[in-house]
Image (cartoon, rainbow, N blue to C red):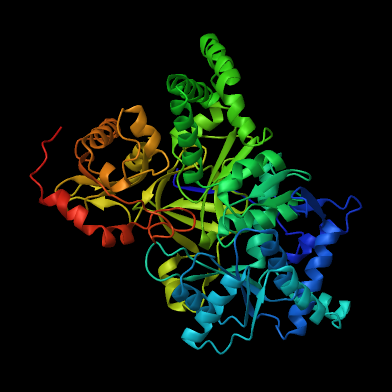
Amino acid sequence: MREKTVPPLVPTPVAKNIADFVVEQAEKPSNPALFARRGASGAWEDVTAKEFRAEVERIAKGLIAEGVAAGDRVAIMARTCYEWSLVDFAIWFAGAVSVPIYETSSPSQIAWNLGNSGAVAAFGETAHHEDAIRAAIDSDDLTAMRHVWQLSPAGLGALAAAGEQVSDEELEARRSAATLESLATIIYTSGTLGRPKGCELTHGNFVALSENAAAALGEVVVPGAKTIMFLPLAHVFARFISVLAVAAGCQVAHTPDIKNLLADLQGFEPNFILVVPRVFEKVYNSALTKAEDGGKGKIFHRAADTAIAWSKSHADGGSPSLGLRLQHALYDALVYRKLRAAMGGHVKYAVSGGGPLGERLGHFFHGIGLRVLEGYGLTETTAPICVNTPSLVKIGTVGAPIPGNAVRIADDGEILAKGVSVMRGYYRLPELQTETFTDGWFHTGDIGELDADGYLRITGRKKDIIVTAGGKNVAPAHLEDQIRADALVSQVVVVGENRPFIGALVTLDEEALPGWLERQGLPAGLSLEDAASHPGVLAHVQSIVDRANASVSKAEAIKSFRVVPTDFTESSGHLTPSLKVKRAQVLADFGSYVEDIYSAPKPSVV
């Protein structure tokens, strides 16, 4: 199949702008709880639709009183928190346009987002964020910027007080003026390549996609369902889910520090969560490391193999054998139940996006009782173009197009997209329109294929495809996924462009390293730098590479690798906020390791 179009389930959007979702929920007699936030005691406290609307309206009036006009851009720089969503909706109620800024952004990145968008005001979560914003304003002489507010109770209270004289009628005129065609937000791409571009997403993108996604996802996003947000709200994936949850009447809690995630999951007990693949990898590897440290590594490995086999047996309508069912039941009591309890005990679904998950992890989590709905999209498509739904999950695919969307596979294998989710263009970059769109189809830059049911499988990134000196095309993701499956490995970057063979850069997981060393009878205090050259570590990584190589042809196999004595992180500038590797930055900063791979004596062909 070369093209799949799915008609919208909601042909005419019910809401005419995003703010209508809040009004609709607040006017329901049931007055559902839309959010939860920490109270003075530390316990989760409900924020009902009426309470949320009232808070949003007070902030929106303050924005109007401070001179924010309809269509003005207002930036938000904060960790994932309730106040992020509060001011986001307040900006929309005031008829303005929100501009997210990652709270880990450098001064030059902050200045670029503010200056390129023409922002007139900004919210910063803390004094640190406020200082960073003001420094960016001063460094680039951003004269359009008139206000910087803190998301503290005092800061928001002062803003609300400033708007007390703004009438309800004036606010409603602002709120209701936006149409589906109106610009809602400018989200800057994570910047794995080049300078970030501002994606213009409209109210219609969010409204039509939310209404159709809610209809397609059925039992996942229903009134009363609960989720906890821990991904950055500056990222389009979390942002869309935040709007979708309000549209569907779900309840959202927030946790700004992933270190507290397990405790927050257990306290809030969500029904569904959204994750990026790296989070799944960390959960799996942490569970494996804990089991091995406790002398139960063999049990965990058998339990993992059983979970994967059980999940695979359900593919294409099949069912597990009696023996496999008995094994699965045994390990459910010994292992799977504990893993589900660690995630709060009530999570039935996990929506995965932001990068390819890989079949191994998909089958494992399905096998332990968590239904993984992998989806696919970009900032330019308001997050999801496609997603697996409860009615049919095909692990290893990213599902069929969400109703209202279409996917086409170009002659060179590139995935093209069209529909309700696709942006209208890049902000202030009209010259990219013809490069980005062909006859209304958006060029995603990804490579994939459609199966007979119209389910999309991602096979690589067009710009990431490696062409060796011998002309062999190699998609690195398949090898990288398998190598990262080992608990000792943190990141992998496969290399080989215009080179005689395929190589790889590997980093070690600093948290898993001490336990691994101790189990091998090696000094647990060995530093990351020393471990990178230790013969025992290198032999282990070689065994992982050998296993991965067994799944590809000889021309695609990794012939040589180097263990880099530091990890790739967001703070080091080598990962995006959604934890994807910035391949070009890694190659620029660790080019000497790549050169070492190819200057060494030619490896023997295995």
Q: Can residue 474 be spotted in the picture?
A: no
Does residue 546 appear left or right of residue 303 in this picture?
A: left
Eyeballing the image, is 468 above or below 13? above
Q: Position of residue 539 (x, y in %)?
A: 23, 33
Residue 119 figure quarter: bottom right
Looking at the picture, how far across and down is residue 386, in whole percent?
55, 48
Q: Residue at x 56, y 11 (%)?
A: 326
* Spot occupied by residue 99 in the image (x, y as percentages of width and height): 59, 71
Q: Dividing the image into 4 quarters, which one contains the C terminus?
A: top left
Above or below residue 412? Residue 179 is below
Corner quadrant of residue 72: bottom right
Please name whichever residue, 102 or 116, is drawn nearer the observer in this view of the structure: 102
Q: Pick whichever, 140 or 370, lies toward us.
A: 140
**From where the camera sits, is residue 586 visible?**
yes
**Which corner quadrant of the image does residue 269 belong to?**
top right
Q: Is residue 578 left or right of residue 247?
A: left
Residue sitting farthest toward the right: 29
For the N terminus, give its image quadrant.
Answer: top left
| Residue farthest along the left direction in this orientation | 601
Q: Residue at x 53, y 13 (%)?
A: 327
On screen, residue 373 versus residue 88, left or right, reads left
Q: Is residue 308 above or below residue 25?
A: above
Q: Position of residue 479 (x, y in %)?
A: 32, 40
In the image, what residue occupies the spot 43% across and 73% down?
Answer: 432
Q: Is residue 293 above or below residue 561?
A: above
